[in-house]
Amino acid sequence: MNTKTDSFRSSQTRRRWLFWGVLLPCILLFAVITSQGIRQWQAAKRFEAEIAQIRASNLPIDNASMTRWFREMTQTEGATAWGEVLLALETTTAPIANSERMPFVGTGDPIAVPDPDRQWPEEKQVGEYLRWIGPTIEKIHQAVQLPKPVWQPIEFRGFQTLLAELQSSRGVTRHLQLEVEHALYQKETERALRGITSLRGVADAFDWQICLVGDLVHRAHAIAHLASIRRSMAYGLWDEAEIDRIDSQLSPPDASQIAQRWQRVFIGERAMLLSSLNDLGMTDYTTDEFGAAATKVVGLPSVKVGLLEKYYQMIRIADGPLDGLPDRANELELWLTQKGSAFDLTTKLASMWLPAIRAYSQSIIREEDDRRVTRTSLAVKKYRLREGQWPQDLTALDGVGLPANERVTAGGKPLGYQVDGDVAWVWGPATSSGATRPEVLPERPDPADESTRDQSSWAMIR
Amino acid sequence: MNDRLAIGRLCWKEFRQLLPLGLLFPLLAVIFFAVAMVRGNTPLVTLMVGVFSFLAATMPGLYATGVGALSVSYEKEQRTLGWLASLPIKPIRIVRVKLLMACAGLILFWALATALMGIARLVSRQQTPSIFEAFDTYAWPVHTLFLMLAGFALAWSTRSGMAAILWVLPVATIPVILSNLILSLFRWRFDFEIDPAAPVLITCQIVSIAVAWWLAERNGIRAIGAQSTVGHAGLRSMREEGLSEPWGWQAEGAVPRSEPSALVWQFIAQNRMVLLGLSLMLATAALIWPLELWGQGVLSIMVTVLGVSWLGTSVFQGDSIAQRIRFLADRGIAPGWVWSTRQLAPASIVSFFLLGLLIALTVAGAGNSVSDLFPLLTLLVLIIYGISHWVAQLLPSPIIASISAPLVAAMAAAYFTLSYVWFAPPWWLMAITVLIPLIATRALTRRWMDRRLGWGYLFANLGFAALMVILPIVPRVARSLTEPRMPSEVRRELSALAPRGISASTPLKELVIAGEMQGQPVTEGEPLKPNNPLRPMGDEWADKLAQVRDQLDSSQVPISAASGVALENLRGIAELCLLAEGNRSLTPAEREQATKIYPETVRLLAQAARRLRMSHRLIEQDMADLVEIWLIKELRRAGSRERLGSDIDSNVRGLLADRAVRQRARERAVAASWAAYQTAKDKDRWAEPEQIGGYHRFGSFVPVTTSGANNGEFRVGELWQWLRAGKQGTNPQRLERIAQAWGVASSAYGLGEIGPYYRADDLNRYVHPGFQPYVLHPGSQWFAGWEDEAEAMGRRFEEGNLESAGVPQK
């Protein structure tokens, strides 16, 4: 039988249990918040250490070091000459009513099918245009002889950095493409070859491995160079010596160069990110209170360390075979956008600053595939010149010195090859599939068919 | 008592009871619009006005939810229900007076909401919806009437006002659930020609209103009738409130006076219904948040804000009813124990909620957009809790506290966010600021327990509130007081020189040369016509030049820096003309044309430089510098005098040699830019002006600050002192200081390894960046080597020393 004292004691015990039961969630929440505070403190220390290490490695971490890094990577000798070229080409317009439709230079399409037997109705206008800008083209030929890559007065401001000269440089390539096309049509082989060589020179001059945009523009130049070579194959103008001269521009890149380029690009991207984190004026996100509030969150040490870790992973994935790069990039991009924990703020708020590495890796593979298609098409023509007939298949190109690994895509798939009467065709994988390892199209693209002709790189060889 | 007089008195009493609630919303409106007026139309203010519009539209709903509790539960809290019952007025009349007064209030609130949303639309320039757009059906106004009547029905039959309000929330869904049930049952049977949802819903609402009215009257009559049958109203009231039963530990006769566990137990026993209801609310919120569909919506936010806020108010609310706290005060319970044990249970529920939410978000898995915001949500919840419990301690009426606390807490959270963004205080100071509500309630618990709630108590609370508002601003103000300023003598000089009546917003009479060198507009898909008439490119250039010349000759006003594109095109034409001279594929006539065009481009650019110098803005002076540097480079070319002709050559040399004109133009521009900046500051002291001397701030958002003025002052002051010091005063230290003040890379001022490519000290190394406005930096070419060369070119030429004047000799 319970006594009054027992009852009192038991109610007191219940109250004590209640008290601790009520207190426990508060303690737990306090522990969670405290652990997050400690995490931020540790992250701040780690961030400082990481920055110190990057600085000690003489790598860029801010605008000033980006400026220095860019200067070290480039040559100033041709800065003025290239500046004048860019100015002239920015200013010039074709003296015709609808100059914007000018092939290559305007927004108009290039001639769909390069064909020496076909009439080129616009040739007269193109010729007139080139007659006037001939000296500028000449200036380009001279400028590409200067030390490369060329420095230009870029003012680095984090993600707000304007790369106006880089964008203008695309006009140089377009004019050279027009020059080459016109020279081929006129059967002026030396002029065309000079143009092709200068196209490579422009790609090298604006080979700014400082950020993603820089490298993508460089790749656009390089791809334009390759495209012009492939288009030239349709004219059947080249002799063996000329083919060798062109082929010498297409040597395969060293794996370490690809890795080094990739690393430089992301080191530059990281520096731009760090500049933007240090000075929010370097971003687009401070134009109103919402953006400013968001950048306050992104400025948390844990977020900054999280971003550095992500860039570290991005820099590292270049190590390894080239054909696996898109897979690795794809995997990493998925990981980058995945959530860690509920406290991981880097995912949503910072993902807008992370570069599209998958697309970038695919652009590298695309350029490599383009290069192999181009080089193979040159070898096919060389075989024809030597043997008097088209090769039965691409393995026959061993005889003209084309290594077997140049006749397949970067993913190891054999390139497409077909002889159709007096014309041979070489083509590569589908570029528009978006797959990490695109398949080579089963049939050659039809240049007359707008829906398929841009699906892969191809060469029509005469 | 005269029946009519009694009814009048009752009405007056009801009016006074409802008045605080009626005043609260216009007060919030005033604060919202004041912020909007101070900050102008920034995106945030637009959102704030939008949010306010939403609040204005929901305001009648909040009123309808709370008015029953206010009108009825207040009587219970004040123990005046017995007094009402004792009046010689039928209970039904008392009940109806309350209902009708509440109805009048509801109509008034709808009128007020309509007016406020109209004002919000005016402030936000039509960017917010009208009240009719916000609630595109009549269902919401009708629903508020139902809410109000349901609130009365519940308030009459529940013990506390908080419980009545809590019950209103689930009851509010009845008409909606009912209509959905009907729709789901009958939708497939009938072929409605119109959307059946609205008619069915309104029917359900009307039926619900009728039932709620009947219940409100019935419950009211019963409650008042019960009061009149009980001998001792006070005792009845005590029994209603659960106080008639002595607490266990009282009965035991061994009161553990300071035992925290007993105090916690007593708090939970006293508020168990409220705590249970709020726990359910927050449990619902924790489940809703991870759902993508609802988690980002208004529902999860509203349930969280209301639940947490009411938990905050529950800290002191239970003890405020009928002055229960006196029981503890009279027994000498330490304020510290009271304060902390009152916090414990609500804080525990909040902690449970946050931990549960964390688990729910983690279980919801990757890709959940809310989980990124969990830390921010935690902070928001703690702020709302802190502010709400402060409001509950400050306001004597728990009902008013319950209704106003969510709004006040939301405003405080908005203030904390904005002050952190605008004033950028250190995080630890912000943490202290967020903790001020807890500090305030702890400090004032003794007075609150003793019910010393007079002016002293009010002022003490105001003091803490002021501290909370001011603390985040302190570092910014301190910085503004200590950061470098413009010396007073510089200010005097600038003021003396500055033209009167100049402001950044005054439209200047200036010329923006249109000169995009683009071809004709093209129709999409238009092919290049084979028979397109060919035109010599030289004619194109000549036409472009004529366009620029016509524009320059059309007026004598200064040129704007926005003409940079046109000037850049002139430079390009000059380059193309020089190239054309040696182009053997051109005919002699075409080369001759190019030869004629070239000097004209140089002449026009020299004219542009003069007109740029006329500008009262800094940026045009810097553009003029770049044009003059380009002209020097042109004069350096072999055979330039022959190419340009003696008139143009002399003209350009005269321009370049006139250092005094250049200096005067710069001084005038600095002073005028300063004056315009000051005028803009005087106009809006809260905001940093958009630009100084034509230079826009990089990253246009700069917080409300008093230091912005000093920063602008310092920048201009540095430039002015440099101008006065001249070439002798140009040194790396000064250049570095100016670069830092203007936030420009020091290389732009010639410093560092690549500086010589940016600053024209040595024209052989300098790389001309063109004339686009984005390449300009304040004063970056002042007193560089090019000025000496420019002067030499002019002066020595006049003296006949052509070679030393830079005239290349053949």
Image: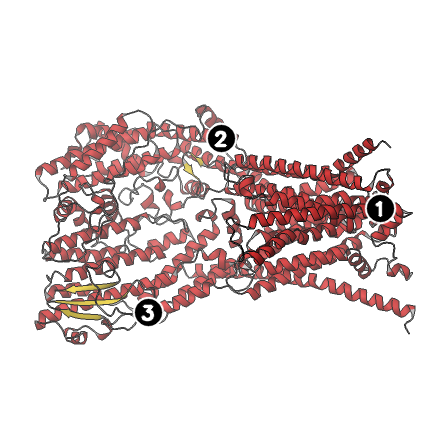
In the rendered image, the vertical position of residue A249 relative to residue B423, given as above or below: below
Give the spatial CA distance, label 2 vs label 3: 62 Å
- Residue B678: give its label: 2
Q: Nearer the viewer, mark 3 or mark 1?
A: 1
Q: CA distance from mark 2 to mark 1?
A: 72 Å
> Which one is nearer the viewer's eye here, A118 or B350?
A118
Residue B706 at what x, y percent from top left? 55, 37
Name the residue beneath numbered marker 3: A437
Relative height, residue B650 to residue B247 (above, below): above
For residue B402, side relative to residue B371 (left or right): right
Relative to residue A121, is residue A13 drawn left or right? right
Secondary structure, mark 3, is loop
Residue B629 seen: no
Q: Are marks 2 and 3 in contact (CB under 8 Å)?
A: no
Rendered image quadrant of residue B726:
top left
Q: What residue did someone put label 1 on?
A: B225
Q: Which mark is residue B241?
A: none
Quarter placement of the N terminus of chain A = bottom right
